[in-house]
Image (tube, coloured by chain):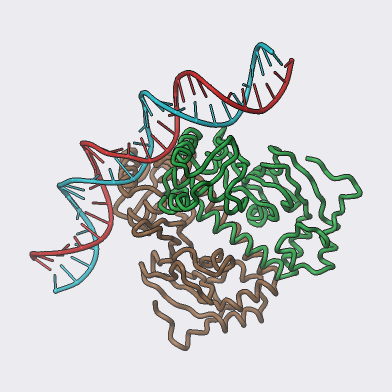
Chain colours: A brown, B green, C cyan, D red
DNA sequence: TTATCTTTGTGATATATATCACATTACTAA
DNA sequence: TTAGTAATGTGATATATATCACAAAGATAA
Protein backbone atom coordinates (compact mmCIF):
# COMPACT_ATOMS: atom_id res chain seq x y z
CA UNK A 1 0.00 0.00 0.00
CA UNK A 2 1.20 3.49 -0.81
CA UNK A 3 -0.18 6.36 1.23
CA UNK A 4 -0.16 9.60 -0.70
CA UNK A 5 2.37 12.31 0.27
CA UNK A 6 1.23 14.98 2.73
CA UNK A 7 0.09 17.58 0.27
CA UNK A 8 -2.38 15.11 -1.14
CA UNK A 9 -3.59 13.49 2.06
CA UNK A 10 -6.53 15.84 2.37
CA UNK A 11 -8.38 15.08 -0.80
CA UNK A 12 -11.08 17.37 -1.99
CA UNK A 13 -14.29 15.43 -2.07
CA UNK A 14 -16.21 18.38 -3.54
CA UNK A 15 -14.33 18.22 -6.82
CA UNK A 16 -13.73 14.48 -6.90
CA UNK A 17 -14.67 12.78 -10.17
CA UNK A 18 -15.14 9.44 -8.46
CA UNK A 19 -17.78 10.44 -5.94
CA UNK A 20 -20.18 7.78 -4.79
CA UNK A 21 -23.83 7.93 -5.69
CA UNK A 22 -24.74 8.31 -2.02
CA UNK A 23 -22.46 11.31 -1.59
CA UNK A 24 -24.72 13.27 -3.91
CA UNK A 25 -27.01 13.55 -0.92
CA UNK A 26 -24.33 15.37 1.09
CA UNK A 27 -24.33 19.14 1.51
CA UNK A 28 -21.32 21.32 0.74
CA UNK A 29 -20.44 21.59 4.40
CA UNK A 30 -20.75 17.84 4.83
CA UNK A 31 -18.48 17.33 1.83
CA UNK A 32 -15.95 19.67 3.38
CA UNK A 33 -16.08 17.65 6.58
CA UNK A 34 -15.68 14.51 4.49
CA UNK A 35 -12.62 15.95 2.76
CA UNK A 36 -10.95 16.52 6.10
CA UNK A 37 -11.63 12.96 7.19
CA UNK A 38 -10.78 11.13 4.04
CA UNK A 39 -7.43 10.06 2.67
CA UNK A 40 -6.30 8.14 -0.27
CA UNK A 41 -4.15 5.03 -0.74
CA UNK A 42 -3.03 2.88 -3.63
CA UNK A 43 -2.64 -0.86 -3.85
CA UNK A 44 -0.86 -3.04 -6.37
CA UNK A 45 -2.47 -6.04 -8.00
CA UNK A 46 -2.68 -8.89 -5.54
CA UNK A 47 -2.32 -6.81 -2.39
CA UNK A 48 -4.76 -7.34 0.44
CA UNK A 49 -6.74 -4.22 1.21
CA UNK A 50 -8.61 -5.55 4.20
CA UNK A 51 -8.42 -8.92 5.91
CA UNK A 52 -11.18 -11.09 7.34
CA UNK A 53 -11.50 -10.80 11.08
CA UNK A 54 -10.03 -7.31 11.35
CA UNK A 55 -11.88 -4.35 12.83
CA UNK A 56 -11.59 -0.94 11.31
CA UNK A 57 -12.35 2.62 12.21
CA UNK A 58 -12.54 3.52 8.53
CA UNK A 59 -14.92 2.95 5.68
CA UNK A 60 -13.07 2.02 2.51
CA UNK A 61 -14.32 3.50 -0.73
CA UNK A 62 -13.10 2.02 -4.01
CA UNK A 63 -12.28 4.86 -6.41
CA UNK A 64 -10.49 2.95 -9.14
CA UNK A 65 -9.73 -0.66 -9.98
CA UNK A 66 -11.30 -4.02 -9.27
CA UNK A 67 -11.42 -5.80 -5.94
CA UNK A 68 -12.36 -9.34 -5.00
CA UNK A 69 -14.47 -9.93 -1.91
CA UNK A 70 -13.51 -13.36 -0.65
CA UNK A 71 -13.25 -15.67 2.30
CA UNK A 72 -11.26 -18.68 3.33
CA UNK A 73 -12.74 -21.71 4.99
CA UNK A 74 -10.06 -23.71 6.76
CA UNK A 75 -6.74 -23.99 4.94
CA UNK A 76 -6.63 -23.46 1.22
CA UNK A 77 -10.30 -23.46 0.28
CA UNK A 78 -11.00 -19.94 -0.94
CA UNK A 79 -14.37 -18.72 -2.20
CA UNK A 80 -14.96 -15.47 -3.99
CA UNK A 81 -18.25 -13.76 -3.19
CA UNK A 82 -18.03 -11.17 -5.90
CA UNK A 83 -15.84 -8.85 -7.89
CA UNK A 84 -16.43 -5.25 -6.83
CA UNK A 85 -16.46 -2.41 -9.31
CA UNK A 86 -15.17 1.12 -8.71
CA UNK A 87 -17.37 3.65 -6.91
CA UNK A 88 -18.48 1.20 -4.24
CA UNK A 89 -17.86 1.01 -0.52
CA UNK A 90 -16.18 -2.19 0.66
CA UNK A 91 -17.84 -4.42 3.21
CA UNK A 92 -20.57 -2.12 4.52
CA UNK A 93 -22.52 -5.21 5.60
CA UNK A 94 -19.76 -6.15 8.02
CA UNK A 95 -19.31 -2.66 9.40
CA UNK A 96 -22.97 -2.11 10.11
CA UNK A 97 -23.71 -5.53 11.54
CA UNK A 98 -20.98 -6.17 14.10
CA UNK A 99 -18.10 -4.06 12.80
CA UNK A 100 -16.05 -7.18 12.33
CA UNK A 101 -14.92 -7.91 8.80
CA UNK A 102 -16.47 -11.16 7.65
CA UNK A 103 -14.65 -11.20 4.32
CA UNK A 104 -11.31 -10.18 2.89
CA UNK A 105 -10.67 -7.72 0.09
CA UNK A 106 -7.78 -7.88 -2.37
CA UNK A 107 -6.85 -5.82 -5.40
CA UNK A 108 -7.32 -7.57 -8.75
CA UNK A 109 -5.87 -4.59 -10.63
CA UNK A 110 -4.00 -1.51 -9.45
CA UNK A 111 -6.44 0.12 -7.07
CA UNK A 112 -7.11 3.54 -5.54
CA UNK A 113 -9.18 3.71 -2.39
CA UNK A 114 -10.23 6.37 0.10
CA UNK A 115 -10.26 5.76 3.83
CA UNK A 116 -13.17 7.60 5.39
CA UNK A 117 -13.41 8.04 9.13
CA UNK A 118 -16.13 5.71 10.39
CA UNK A 119 -17.49 8.19 12.93
CA UNK A 120 -17.93 10.84 10.28
CA UNK A 121 -19.59 8.38 7.95
CA UNK A 122 -21.92 7.14 10.69
CA UNK A 123 -22.72 10.73 11.62
CA UNK A 124 -23.79 11.39 8.03
CA UNK A 125 -26.10 8.38 8.11
CA UNK A 126 -27.66 9.41 11.39
CA UNK A 127 -27.98 13.09 10.60
CA UNK A 128 -28.63 13.10 6.89
CA UNK A 129 -31.50 10.74 6.23
CA UNK A 130 -31.20 11.00 2.48
CA UNK A 131 -27.60 9.86 2.66
CA UNK A 132 -28.57 7.04 5.01
CA UNK A 133 -31.32 6.03 2.65
CA UNK A 134 -28.91 5.83 -0.27
CA UNK A 135 -26.47 3.72 1.72
CA UNK A 136 -29.34 1.45 2.72
CA UNK A 137 -30.35 1.15 -0.93
CA UNK A 138 -26.87 0.23 -2.05
CA UNK A 139 -26.53 -2.43 0.64
CA UNK A 140 -29.92 -3.86 -0.35
CA UNK A 141 -28.99 -3.92 -3.99
CA UNK A 142 -25.74 -5.64 -3.27
CA UNK A 143 -27.51 -8.22 -1.12
CA UNK A 144 -30.07 -9.04 -3.77
CA UNK A 145 -27.42 -9.40 -6.46
CA UNK A 146 -25.45 -11.73 -4.26
CA UNK A 147 -28.52 -13.76 -3.34
CA UNK A 148 -29.41 -14.19 -6.99
CA UNK A 149 -25.90 -15.17 -7.86
CA UNK A 150 -25.77 -17.69 -5.02
CA UNK A 151 -29.03 -19.27 -6.02
CA UNK A 152 -27.93 -19.55 -9.63
CA UNK A 153 -24.68 -21.11 -8.49
CA UNK A 154 -26.72 -23.66 -6.66
CA UNK A 155 -29.19 -24.54 -9.33
CA UNK A 156 -27.22 -24.38 -12.53
CA UNK A 157 -24.89 -26.84 -14.16
CA UNK A 158 -21.30 -25.98 -14.89
CA UNK A 159 -22.00 -24.58 -18.36
CA UNK A 160 -24.72 -22.34 -16.96
CA UNK A 161 -22.46 -21.09 -14.21
CA UNK A 162 -19.55 -20.42 -16.54
CA UNK A 163 -21.85 -18.60 -18.96
CA UNK A 164 -23.12 -16.52 -16.03
CA UNK A 165 -19.61 -15.61 -14.99
CA UNK A 166 -18.56 -14.60 -18.50
CA UNK A 167 -21.71 -12.51 -18.92
CA UNK A 168 -21.14 -10.96 -15.50
CA UNK A 169 -17.72 -9.72 -16.57
CA UNK A 170 -18.81 -8.68 -20.04
CA UNK A 171 -22.03 -6.92 -19.08
CA UNK A 172 -21.67 -5.84 -15.47
CA UNK A 173 -17.96 -5.33 -14.88
CA UNK A 174 -16.55 -4.24 -18.24
CA UNK A 175 -19.53 -3.42 -20.45
CA UNK A 176 -17.70 -4.96 -23.41
CA UNK A 177 -17.81 -8.24 -25.32
CA UNK A 178 -14.05 -8.58 -25.13
CA UNK A 179 -12.13 -8.20 -21.90
CA UNK A 180 -9.15 -9.37 -19.91
CA UNK A 181 -10.32 -11.57 -17.09
CA UNK A 182 -8.92 -10.12 -13.86
CA UNK A 183 -8.80 -13.60 -12.33
CA UNK A 184 -6.69 -16.70 -12.76
CA UNK A 185 -8.46 -19.90 -13.72
CA UNK A 186 -8.21 -20.99 -10.11
CA UNK A 187 -9.85 -17.78 -8.93
CA UNK A 188 -12.51 -18.07 -11.59
CA UNK A 189 -13.21 -21.54 -10.22
CA UNK A 190 -13.49 -20.08 -6.70
CA UNK A 191 -15.94 -17.49 -7.98
CA UNK A 192 -18.06 -20.01 -9.85
CA UNK A 193 -17.84 -22.56 -7.10
CA UNK A 194 -16.32 -25.50 -8.91
CA UNK A 195 -12.97 -27.15 -9.45
CA UNK A 196 -10.32 -25.48 -11.58
CA UNK A 197 -10.17 -28.47 -13.89
CA UNK A 198 -13.89 -28.49 -14.56
CA UNK A 199 -13.80 -24.79 -15.36
CA UNK A 200 -10.86 -25.26 -17.75
CA UNK A 201 -12.65 -28.06 -19.53
CA UNK A 202 -15.87 -26.12 -19.86
CA UNK A 203 -13.98 -23.14 -21.28
CA UNK A 204 -12.52 -25.47 -23.90
CA UNK A 205 -16.00 -26.67 -24.79
CA UNK A 206 -17.21 -23.08 -25.27
CA UNK A 207 -14.17 -22.38 -27.47
CA UNK A 208 -14.79 -25.51 -29.55
CA UNK A 209 -18.43 -24.51 -29.94
CA UNK A 210 -17.28 -21.06 -31.12
CA UNK A 211 -19.25 -19.34 -28.35
CA UNK A 212 -16.16 -17.55 -27.09
CA UNK A 213 -12.53 -17.23 -28.12
CA UNK A 214 -9.83 -17.28 -25.50
CA UNK A 215 -6.20 -16.21 -25.44
CA UNK A 216 -4.83 -16.53 -21.95
CA UNK A 217 -6.91 -14.22 -19.82
CA UNK A 218 -8.38 -12.43 -22.80
CA UNK A 219 -11.93 -13.52 -23.52
CA UNK A 220 -14.05 -12.51 -26.47
CA UNK A 221 -17.69 -13.39 -26.79
CA UNK A 222 -18.41 -14.63 -30.31
CA UNK A 223 -22.01 -15.73 -29.94
CA UNK A 224 -23.80 -13.63 -27.34
CA UNK A 225 -27.22 -15.08 -28.11
CA UNK A 226 -26.10 -18.62 -27.52
CA UNK A 227 -24.19 -17.64 -24.39
CA UNK A 228 -27.23 -15.90 -22.91
CA UNK A 229 -29.30 -18.92 -23.76
CA UNK A 230 -26.89 -21.25 -21.99
CA UNK A 231 -27.00 -18.96 -18.99
CA UNK A 232 -30.80 -18.98 -19.00
CA UNK A 233 -31.19 -22.70 -19.57
CA UNK A 234 -28.60 -23.43 -16.89
CA UNK B 1 -55.82 -13.59 5.21
CA UNK B 2 -58.06 -12.12 7.90
CA UNK B 3 -58.07 -8.37 8.33
CA UNK B 4 -58.95 -7.36 11.88
CA UNK B 5 -62.37 -5.75 12.51
CA UNK B 6 -62.52 -1.95 12.49
CA UNK B 7 -62.09 -1.31 16.17
CA UNK B 8 -58.76 -3.09 16.03
CA UNK B 9 -57.45 -1.76 12.73
CA UNK B 10 -55.62 1.09 14.39
CA UNK B 11 -53.21 -0.79 16.54
CA UNK B 12 -51.38 0.97 19.29
CA UNK B 13 -47.70 0.73 18.54
CA UNK B 14 -46.77 2.49 21.78
CA UNK B 15 -48.02 -0.36 23.92
CA UNK B 16 -47.26 -3.20 21.53
CA UNK B 17 -45.35 -6.12 23.06
CA UNK B 18 -43.97 -7.16 19.71
CA UNK B 19 -42.22 -3.94 18.76
CA UNK B 20 -39.19 -4.21 16.52
CA UNK B 21 -35.75 -3.39 17.78
CA UNK B 22 -35.53 -0.49 15.35
CA UNK B 23 -38.76 1.07 16.62
CA UNK B 24 -37.04 1.73 19.94
CA UNK B 25 -35.40 4.62 18.13
CA UNK B 26 -38.79 6.20 17.41
CA UNK B 27 -40.18 9.07 19.48
CA UNK B 28 -43.63 9.01 21.07
CA UNK B 29 -45.03 11.22 18.32
CA UNK B 30 -43.48 9.02 15.66
CA UNK B 31 -45.01 5.96 17.33
CA UNK B 32 -48.39 7.69 17.30
CA UNK B 33 -47.98 8.37 13.60
CA UNK B 34 -46.97 4.73 13.15
CA UNK B 35 -50.08 3.56 15.00
CA UNK B 36 -52.27 5.49 12.59
CA UNK B 37 -50.54 3.97 9.57
CA UNK B 38 -50.27 0.42 10.71
CA UNK B 39 -52.81 -2.35 10.61
CA UNK B 40 -52.80 -5.94 11.48
CA UNK B 41 -53.63 -9.13 9.57
CA UNK B 42 -53.54 -12.84 10.25
CA UNK B 43 -52.56 -15.70 7.98
CA UNK B 44 -53.12 -19.39 8.28
CA UNK B 45 -50.34 -21.94 7.84
CA UNK B 46 -49.48 -22.27 4.18
CA UNK B 47 -50.97 -18.97 3.06
CA UNK B 48 -48.89 -16.69 0.89
CA UNK B 49 -48.25 -13.35 2.56
CA UNK B 50 -46.45 -11.71 -0.32
CA UNK B 51 -45.67 -13.01 -3.80
CA UNK B 52 -42.53 -12.64 -5.88
CA UNK B 53 -42.85 -9.95 -8.50
CA UNK B 54 -45.45 -7.88 -6.68
CA UNK B 55 -44.98 -4.27 -5.68
CA UNK B 56 -46.23 -2.99 -2.39
CA UNK B 57 -46.91 0.31 -0.72
CA UNK B 58 -46.56 -1.34 2.67
CA UNK B 59 -43.79 -2.71 4.79
CA UNK B 60 -44.74 -6.02 6.37
CA UNK B 61 -43.69 -6.63 9.94
CA UNK B 62 -43.85 -10.14 11.33
CA UNK B 63 -45.29 -10.00 14.85
CA UNK B 64 -45.91 -13.66 15.47
CA UNK B 65 -45.25 -16.96 13.72
CA UNK B 66 -42.71 -18.27 11.25
CA UNK B 67 -42.42 -17.35 7.60
CA UNK B 68 -40.43 -18.86 4.76
CA UNK B 69 -38.67 -16.55 2.31
CA UNK B 70 -38.52 -18.44 -0.96
CA UNK B 71 -38.36 -18.26 -4.70
CA UNK B 72 -39.27 -20.36 -7.67
CA UNK B 73 -37.06 -20.89 -10.67
CA UNK B 74 -39.08 -22.10 -13.65
CA UNK B 75 -41.80 -24.63 -12.89
CA UNK B 76 -41.62 -26.65 -9.69
CA UNK B 77 -38.07 -25.95 -8.49
CA UNK B 78 -38.50 -24.04 -5.25
CA UNK B 79 -35.64 -22.82 -3.07
CA UNK B 80 -36.01 -21.50 0.43
CA UNK B 81 -33.66 -18.69 1.36
CA UNK B 82 -34.41 -18.68 5.03
CA UNK B 83 -37.00 -19.12 7.73
CA UNK B 84 -37.86 -15.78 9.29
CA UNK B 85 -38.47 -15.38 12.99
CA UNK B 86 -41.00 -13.03 14.60
CA UNK B 87 -40.07 -9.37 15.13
CA UNK B 88 -38.54 -8.97 11.69
CA UNK B 89 -39.54 -6.95 8.66
CA UNK B 90 -40.14 -9.00 5.51
CA UNK B 91 -38.15 -8.32 2.38
CA UNK B 92 -36.60 -4.95 3.20
CA UNK B 93 -33.85 -5.69 0.67
CA UNK B 94 -36.41 -5.78 -2.13
CA UNK B 95 -38.25 -2.66 -1.03
CA UNK B 96 -35.12 -0.54 -0.74
CA UNK B 97 -33.42 -1.74 -3.89
CA UNK B 98 -36.07 -1.50 -6.61
CA UNK B 99 -39.31 -1.89 -4.64
CA UNK B 100 -40.05 -5.05 -6.54
CA UNK B 101 -40.37 -8.19 -4.47
CA UNK B 102 -37.65 -10.62 -5.47
CA UNK B 103 -38.87 -13.41 -3.21
CA UNK B 104 -42.15 -14.79 -1.92
CA UNK B 105 -43.24 -15.09 1.69
CA UNK B 106 -45.54 -17.77 3.08
CA UNK B 107 -46.72 -18.61 6.58
CA UNK B 108 -45.22 -21.78 8.07
CA UNK B 109 -47.36 -21.44 11.20
CA UNK B 110 -50.34 -19.23 12.02
CA UNK B 111 -48.95 -15.74 11.57
CA UNK B 112 -49.74 -12.18 12.66
CA UNK B 113 -48.30 -9.33 10.66
CA UNK B 114 -48.58 -5.55 10.59
CA UNK B 115 -48.84 -3.58 7.38
CA UNK B 116 -46.99 -0.30 7.74
CA UNK B 117 -47.42 2.46 5.22
CA UNK B 118 -44.25 2.61 3.12
CA UNK B 119 -44.19 6.40 2.96
CA UNK B 120 -44.37 6.72 6.71
CA UNK B 121 -41.65 4.10 7.14
CA UNK B 122 -39.43 5.81 4.58
CA UNK B 123 -40.06 9.16 6.25
CA UNK B 124 -38.82 7.72 9.55
CA UNK B 125 -35.66 6.49 7.89
CA UNK B 126 -34.98 9.82 6.25
CA UNK B 127 -35.87 11.98 9.22
CA UNK B 128 -34.77 9.85 12.14
CA UNK B 129 -31.20 8.80 11.52
CA UNK B 130 -31.08 6.49 14.50
CA UNK B 131 -34.05 4.56 13.16
CA UNK B 132 -32.47 4.45 9.70
CA UNK B 133 -29.24 3.23 11.22
CA UNK B 134 -31.04 0.39 13.00
CA UNK B 135 -32.81 -0.64 9.83
CA UNK B 136 -29.49 -0.58 8.00
CA UNK B 137 -27.97 -2.76 10.70
CA UNK B 138 -30.73 -5.29 10.52
CA UNK B 139 -30.46 -5.53 6.73
CA UNK B 140 -26.68 -5.97 7.01
CA UNK B 141 -27.05 -8.64 9.64
CA UNK B 142 -29.56 -10.51 7.57
CA UNK B 143 -27.29 -10.30 4.53
CA UNK B 144 -24.28 -11.65 6.35
CA UNK B 145 -26.24 -14.52 7.82
CA UNK B 146 -27.55 -15.43 4.42
CA UNK B 147 -24.11 -15.17 2.81
CA UNK B 148 -22.64 -17.46 5.44
CA UNK B 149 -25.45 -19.92 5.02
CA UNK B 150 -25.07 -19.89 1.24
CA UNK B 151 -21.35 -20.48 1.41
CA UNK B 152 -21.79 -23.35 3.84
CA UNK B 153 -24.41 -24.83 1.55
CA UNK B 154 -21.86 -24.72 -1.18
CA UNK B 155 -18.90 -26.15 0.60
CA UNK B 156 -20.38 -28.77 2.87
CA UNK B 157 -21.45 -32.30 2.23
CA UNK B 158 -25.00 -33.44 2.85
CA UNK B 159 -24.38 -34.44 6.47
CA UNK B 160 -22.82 -31.06 7.21
CA UNK B 161 -25.72 -29.25 5.61
CA UNK B 162 -28.35 -31.27 7.43
CA UNK B 163 -26.53 -30.76 10.72
CA UNK B 164 -26.47 -27.02 9.98
CA UNK B 165 -30.19 -26.97 9.32
CA UNK B 166 -31.05 -28.88 12.49
CA UNK B 167 -28.80 -26.61 14.55
CA UNK B 168 -30.33 -23.57 12.87
CA UNK B 169 -33.79 -24.58 14.02
CA UNK B 170 -32.67 -25.70 17.46
CA UNK B 171 -30.44 -22.75 18.28
CA UNK B 172 -31.63 -19.84 16.17
CA UNK B 173 -35.33 -20.42 15.56
CA UNK B 174 -36.58 -22.29 18.61
CA UNK B 175 -33.80 -22.09 21.20
CA UNK B 176 -34.57 -25.67 22.24
CA UNK B 177 -33.07 -29.09 21.61
CA UNK B 178 -36.46 -30.54 20.78
CA UNK B 179 -38.80 -28.90 18.31
CA UNK B 180 -41.41 -29.47 15.65
CA UNK B 181 -39.94 -28.79 12.27
CA UNK B 182 -42.17 -26.22 10.54
CA UNK B 183 -41.27 -27.70 7.15
CA UNK B 184 -42.10 -30.85 5.23
CA UNK B 185 -39.20 -33.03 4.13
CA UNK B 186 -39.52 -31.56 0.68
CA UNK B 187 -39.28 -28.03 2.03
CA UNK B 188 -36.35 -28.99 4.23
CA UNK B 189 -34.67 -30.26 1.07
CA UNK B 190 -35.39 -26.92 -0.63
CA UNK B 191 -33.85 -25.09 2.31
CA UNK B 192 -30.77 -27.28 2.41
CA UNK B 193 -30.43 -27.34 -1.35
CA UNK B 194 -30.59 -31.05 -2.06
CA UNK B 195 -33.05 -33.71 -3.12
CA UNK B 196 -35.79 -34.84 -0.79
CA UNK B 197 -34.59 -38.42 -0.99
CA UNK B 198 -31.04 -37.56 0.01
CA UNK B 199 -32.30 -35.56 2.98
CA UNK B 200 -34.53 -38.44 4.10
CA UNK B 201 -31.67 -40.86 3.90
CA UNK B 202 -29.32 -38.62 5.82
CA UNK B 203 -31.92 -38.13 8.55
CA UNK B 204 -32.13 -41.92 8.85
CA UNK B 205 -28.35 -42.08 9.23
CA UNK B 206 -28.42 -39.50 12.05
CA UNK B 207 -31.18 -41.47 13.77
CA UNK B 208 -29.24 -44.73 13.43
CA UNK B 209 -26.16 -43.03 14.86
CA UNK B 210 -28.29 -41.80 17.79
CA UNK B 211 -27.44 -38.17 17.05
CA UNK B 212 -31.09 -37.22 16.82
CA UNK B 213 -34.43 -38.92 17.33
CA UNK B 214 -37.27 -38.24 14.95
CA UNK B 215 -41.01 -38.73 15.10
CA UNK B 216 -42.65 -37.24 12.07
CA UNK B 217 -41.82 -33.55 12.19
CA UNK B 218 -40.67 -33.68 15.79
CA UNK B 219 -36.91 -33.65 16.12
CA UNK B 220 -34.90 -34.10 19.30
CA UNK B 221 -31.16 -33.63 19.46
CA UNK B 222 -29.60 -36.46 21.44
CA UNK B 223 -25.92 -35.71 20.93
CA UNK B 224 -25.36 -31.99 20.52
CA UNK B 225 -21.56 -32.26 20.63
CA UNK B 226 -21.44 -34.71 17.78
CA UNK B 227 -23.98 -32.72 15.77
CA UNK B 228 -21.96 -29.53 16.16
CA UNK B 229 -18.87 -31.40 15.16
CA UNK B 230 -20.50 -32.73 12.01
CA UNK B 231 -21.61 -29.20 11.20
CA UNK B 232 -18.08 -27.90 11.71
CA UNK B 233 -16.33 -30.67 9.81
CA UNK B 234 -18.83 -30.39 6.96
C1' DT C 1 -66.17 -46.66 6.34
C1' DT C 2 -63.57 -46.63 1.74
C1' DA C 3 -61.07 -44.36 -1.80
C1' DT C 4 -57.81 -40.92 -3.26
C1' DC C 5 -54.00 -38.06 -2.76
C1' DT C 6 -49.81 -36.61 -0.44
C1' DT C 7 -45.84 -37.41 2.19
C1' DT C 8 -42.12 -40.17 3.45
C1' DG C 9 -38.52 -43.88 3.46
C1' DT C 10 -35.34 -46.73 0.99
C1' DG C 11 -32.95 -49.57 -2.48
C1' DA C 12 -30.91 -49.63 -7.35
C1' DT C 13 -28.98 -47.02 -10.91
C1' DA C 14 -27.38 -42.92 -13.46
C1' DT C 15 -24.66 -38.88 -13.83
C1' DA C 16 -22.29 -34.58 -13.08
C1' DT C 17 -18.40 -33.11 -11.20
C1' DA C 18 -14.30 -33.73 -8.24
C1' DT C 19 -10.05 -35.76 -7.92
C1' DC C 20 -5.89 -37.60 -9.60
C1' DA C 21 -2.17 -37.72 -12.78
C1' DC C 22 0.68 -35.75 -15.93
C1' DA C 23 2.12 -32.91 -19.91
C1' DT C 24 2.63 -28.23 -21.52
C1' DT C 25 3.17 -23.54 -21.24
C1' DA C 26 3.98 -19.15 -18.95
C1' DC C 27 6.28 -16.63 -15.45
C1' DT C 28 10.15 -15.38 -12.09
C1' DA C 29 14.51 -14.82 -10.48
C1' DA C 30 19.32 -15.82 -10.29
C1' DT D 1 20.56 -17.60 -20.52
C1' DT D 2 18.87 -21.46 -17.28
C1' DA D 3 16.49 -23.41 -13.46
C1' DG D 4 12.71 -23.52 -10.77
C1' DT D 5 7.95 -22.45 -9.78
C1' DA D 6 3.19 -21.53 -10.82
C1' DA D 7 -0.64 -21.72 -14.02
C1' DT D 8 -3.15 -24.24 -17.34
C1' DG D 9 -5.18 -28.03 -20.22
C1' DT D 10 -6.81 -32.65 -20.58
C1' DG D 11 -7.59 -37.66 -20.08
C1' DA D 12 -8.84 -41.52 -16.69
C1' DT D 13 -11.06 -42.66 -12.58
C1' DA D 14 -13.65 -42.05 -8.24
C1' DT D 15 -17.53 -40.45 -5.74
C1' DA D 16 -21.32 -37.86 -3.90
C1' DT D 17 -25.69 -37.00 -4.89
C1' DA D 18 -29.65 -36.96 -8.07
C1' DT D 19 -32.94 -39.62 -10.19
C1' DC D 20 -35.91 -43.43 -10.65
C1' DA D 21 -38.94 -46.80 -8.79
C1' DC D 22 -41.87 -48.43 -5.51
C1' DA D 23 -43.83 -49.47 -0.97
C1' DA D 24 -45.69 -47.84 3.32
C1' DA D 25 -47.85 -44.57 6.11
C1' DG D 26 -50.69 -40.39 6.84
C1' DA D 27 -53.98 -37.11 5.58
C1' DT D 28 -58.33 -35.76 3.24
C1' DA D 29 -62.62 -36.13 1.44
C1' DA D 30 -66.75 -38.52 -0.07
Residue B147 in percent (x, y) is at 52, 55
Residue B212 in percent (x, y) is at 51, 43
Please indicate whether residue A29 sits to the left or right of residue A177 in the image.
right
Residue B18 in percent (x, y) is at 75, 57
| Residue positioned most to the bottom | A7
One can see residue A157 in this view: yes
Please indicate whether residue A231 sits to the left or right of residue B66 in the image.
left
Q: Nearer the viewer, residue B207 or A209?
A: B207
One can see residue A231 in this view: no
Query: Which image quadrant is residue A212 in?
Result: top left
* Count of all numbered marks drawn on residues in the image: 0
Tell me what residue is drawn at x 47 percent, y 73 percent: A113
Tell me what residue is drawn at x 48 percent, y 78 percent: A40
| Residue positioned most to the right | B7
Tell me what residue is drawn at x 47 percent, y 55 percent: A175
Q: Which of B164 and A106 is in front in this view?
A: B164
Residue A176 position (above or below residue B23): above
Q: Which of B104 and C26 is in front in this view?
A: B104
Residue A13 in percent (x, y) is at 57, 78
Image quadrant in which the N terminus of chain B is located:
top right
Residue B232 position (above or below residue B73): below
Please indicate whether residue C27 sits to the left or right of residue B80 in the image.
left
Amino acid sequence: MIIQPDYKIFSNCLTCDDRSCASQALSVSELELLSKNCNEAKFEQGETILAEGSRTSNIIYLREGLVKEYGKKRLQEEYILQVIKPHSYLGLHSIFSDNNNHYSYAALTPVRVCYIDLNVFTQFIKENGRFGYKILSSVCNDSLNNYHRFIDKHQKKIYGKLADAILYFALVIFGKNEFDLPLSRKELAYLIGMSRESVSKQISVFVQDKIISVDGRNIKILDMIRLKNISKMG
